[in-house]
Image (cartoon, rainbow, N blue to C red):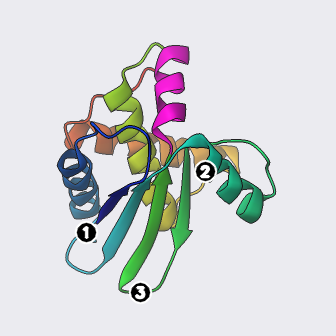
Amino acid sequence: MLDNRSSWPDLTCDLYQEWARRVLVAEKQADTVELSISLVDEAEIQALNQRWRQIDAPTDVLSFECDAQMLGDVVICPAVAAQHARDFDSSFPAEMGLMLTHGILHLLGYDHIEDDQAAVMEARENELLGQCGIISSSR
């Protein structure tokens, strides 16, 4: 399920749902869980970031775990993804795909706090971006 509450109404929700499905299939989770995706503006993601991470700033993606049947919620801010695309000489679709993949991997237990964990997570992100037909970012 995708809920677009952002001021970016032209985003193709079916595309992001398909990308999420492909990531879940690759991670052997597609038949066992449900996932919610929300697209929000900077003010909403900043409020969530402040509430749950005590960081009073917008961020690109947040993930919230649920239970065994509902894997969780991935909340993405398209405005921040667009800024990343400019900053990293990438494309908006690539950044959105990266944020979606990154958020799903967090829900599946991947993390990037330690350098070795970050290397594993980044390698899996890049592999999934390629497998799912999402253009990899240049980061």
Local secondary structure at mark 2: helix
Foreground tag (2 vs 3): 2
Q: Are marks 1 and 3 in contact (CB under 8 Å)?
A: no
**Type of amino acid at the residue the image marks with label 3:** Ala
Q: Residue at coordinates 81% horizontally, 57% vertically from top-left?
A: 54
Element type at mark 3: loop
Q: Is residue 79 magenta?
A: yes
Determine whether the residue tagged by mark 1 lies in a helix, strand or loop. loop
Circle 1 is placed at which residue position? Answer: 28
Mark 2, other Cα within 10 Å: few <14 / some 14–19 / many ≥20: many
**In the rendering, which numbered label is found on residue 68?**
3
Residue at image coords 44%, 45% = 6
Q: Which residues are magenta?
A: 77-88
Q: Position of residue 75 (x, y in %)?
A: 49, 55
Judge by depth and name the residue closer to the eye, 51 or 102: 51
Res. 45 mark: 2
Residue furthest toward the bottom? Answer: 68
Residue 96 is covered by the magenta coloring: no
| Residue 9 appears in the figure | yes
* Among the two numbered marks 2 and 3 on one chain, the one whose residue lies closer to the N terminus: 2
Where is residue 31? Give x, y as percent.
19, 77
Residue 120 image offset from top left, x and y in percent: 51, 47
Q: Quadrant of residue 60?
A: top right
Considering depth in this image, is 128 or 80 the residue closer to the camera?
Answer: 80
Q: Main secondary structure of the magenta part?
A: helix
Q: What kind of residue is marked 1?
A: Lys
